[in-house]
Image (cartoon, helix red, strand yellow):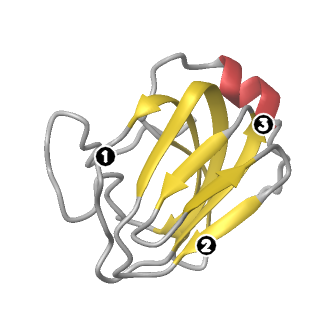
Amino acid sequence: MPVSKVNLSEKLKAFHDYWSPRIVGELNGQQVKLAKFKGEFLKHKHEAEDELFLVLEGKLFIELAEQTLELNPGEFTIIPRGVEHKPYAPAETSVLLFEPAGTLNTGDRQNERTVSQPEKL
């Protein structure tokens, strides 16, 4: 099996829509995804999956029941399974997500923003 590298900057240039993650890698049943966020997303939770958010560019806020996290470039957080959260980004923000394959971006809520089959870049 060939081994290759992934250039995150190049992958981020390949799409422009918000809240629609793209798969850029897979390992051990997990997926590495890139997404661009801007504005507010819906409040949701993932019953069976933990979710890692790593900010590459911009600023991401994640509203939780007791606090709001502010993530800047180079910072990440892990949202444990079952924890309701609402991400929002005042300006365009690039994020790397690491989560189990098959994790829906909208968790326990399904609507027009649900991406059931993320595109592979």
Comparing 42 with 33, the one in front is: 42
The mark nearer the N terminus, 3 or 2, is: 3
Q: Reading the chain from its start, which is encountered first: label 2 or label 1?
A: 2
Q: CA distance from mark 2 to mark 1?
A: 23 Å
- Residue highlighted by disc 2: 78
In depth, the one of 45 and 15 nearer the eye is 45
Which residue is at a point 55% across and 71% down the rendered structure image?
30
Q: Residues within 10 Å of mark 3 (few under 14, many from 20)?
A: few
- Residue at 78% across / 37% down in the picture? 8
Q: Does dot 1 land on a helix, a strand or a loop?
A: loop
Q: Examine the rendered structure and indicate whether residue 77 appears above or below residue 55.
A: below
- Circle 3: residue type: Leu
Residue 89 versus residue 31: which sits nearer the camera?
89
Categorize mark 2 by other alpha carbons within 10 Å: few (<14), some (14-19), many (20+). few
Could you tell me the amino acid type at mark 2? Ile
In the image: residue 55, left or right of residue 68: right
- Looking at the image, tell me whether mark 1 or mark 3 is earlier in sequence order: 3
Residue 3 falls in which quadrant of the image?
Answer: bottom right
Q: Residue drawn 41% across and 78% down?
A: 49
- Disc 1 to disc 3, how far (Cα)? 20 Å
Report whether 17 appears left or right of 77. left
Looking at the image, is mark 3 or mark 2 nearer the viewer? Answer: 2
Q: Amino acid at mark 1?
A: Gln
- Distance Cα–Cα, label 3 vs label 2: 20 Å
User: Looking at the figure, which quarter contains the C terminus?
Assistant: top right
Query: Image height check: is 43 above or below 118?
Result: below
